[in-house]
Image (cartoon, rainbow, N blue to C red):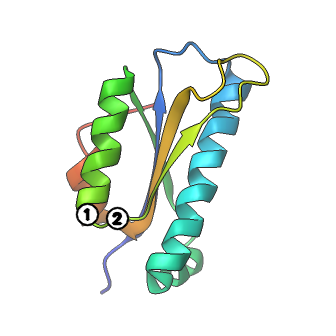
């Protein structure tokens, strides 16, 4: 049996974003990582699309923690997307809000995000 493919979205909780803003930032992270995965590992994307597009949303409590997750994912060669807000509503322009990782094999994602708490 093939390993599960999933996507993980990591959102900063310290920014006190409203729910709608948080969902929008997570959507940006998801789509950005998807597009990166399509470029890097189309076979992972195909398996993910065929298996229901599993997504897990987790949280971090600081910019430093989010950047650490981003760098660790990059170092493992995972498709990853760092989201910077446009600053049109609640946040200052350029505020880093979230990270999307994958779709990728669950075992690789869990090395980076397995310790994080669900949002």
Would you call the spot at circle 2 few (<14 residues within 10 Å), some (14-19), or many (20 or more)? many
The secondary element bearing badge 1 is classed as helix
As displayed, is residue 109 above or below residue 39?
A: above
Residue at 51% of width from left, 61% of height from top?
A: 54
Residue at 53% of width from left, 31% of height from top?
A: 97
Numbered disc total: 2
In this view, the mark in front (1 or 2): 2
Residue 10 rendering spot, x and y as whole percentages: 45, 39
> Which of pointers 1 and 2 lies earlier in the amino acid sequence?
2
Residue at 55% of width from left, 76% of height from top?
A: 38
Q: Is residue 90 left or right of residue 111?
A: right
Residue 70 or 51: which is nearer the viewer? 70
Residue 25 or 4: which is nearer the viewer? 25
Residue 16 or 71: which is nearer the viewer? 71
Q: Which mark is residue 78?
A: 2
Residue bearing the label numbered 1: 108
Residue 3 or 101: which is nearer the viewer? 101
Residue at 39% of width from left, 25% of height from top?
A: 63
The image quadrant where one finds the N terminus is bottom left
Residue 44 rendering spot, x and y as whole percentages: 44, 79
Residue 55 rendering spot, x and y as whole percentages: 51, 54
Find the distance from the CA under tag 1 to the CA under tag 2: 8 Å
The reply to whether residue 53 is in sight is no
Would you call the spot at circle 1 few (<14 residues within 10 Å), some (14-19), or many (20 or more)? some
Q: Is residue 95 left or right of residue 18?
A: left
Residue 112 rendering spot, x and y as whole percentages: 25, 49
The reply to whether residue 96 is in sight is yes
Q: Quadrant of residue 23?
A: top right
The secondary element bearing badge 2 is classed as loop
Residue placed furthest toward the right: 88
As displayed, is residue 43 above or below residue 83?
A: below
Q: Do the residues under discs 1 and 2 have CB atoms within 8 angstroms?
A: yes
């Amino acid at each position: 049996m093939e390993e599960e493919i999933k996507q993980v979205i990591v959102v900063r909780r310290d920014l006190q974003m409203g729910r709608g803003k948080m969902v929008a930032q997570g959507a940006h992270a998801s789509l950005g990582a998807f597009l990166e995965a399509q470029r890097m590992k189309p076979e992972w994307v195909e398996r993910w699309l065929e298996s229901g597009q599993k997504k897990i949303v987790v949280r971090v409590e600081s910019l430093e923690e989010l950047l650490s997750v981003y760098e660790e994912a990059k170092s493992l060669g995972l498709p990853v997307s760092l989201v910077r807000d446009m600053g049109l509503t609640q946040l200052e322009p350029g505020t880093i809000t979230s990270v999307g990782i994958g779709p990728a094999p669950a075992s690789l994602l869990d090395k980076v995000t397995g310790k994080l708490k669900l949002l």
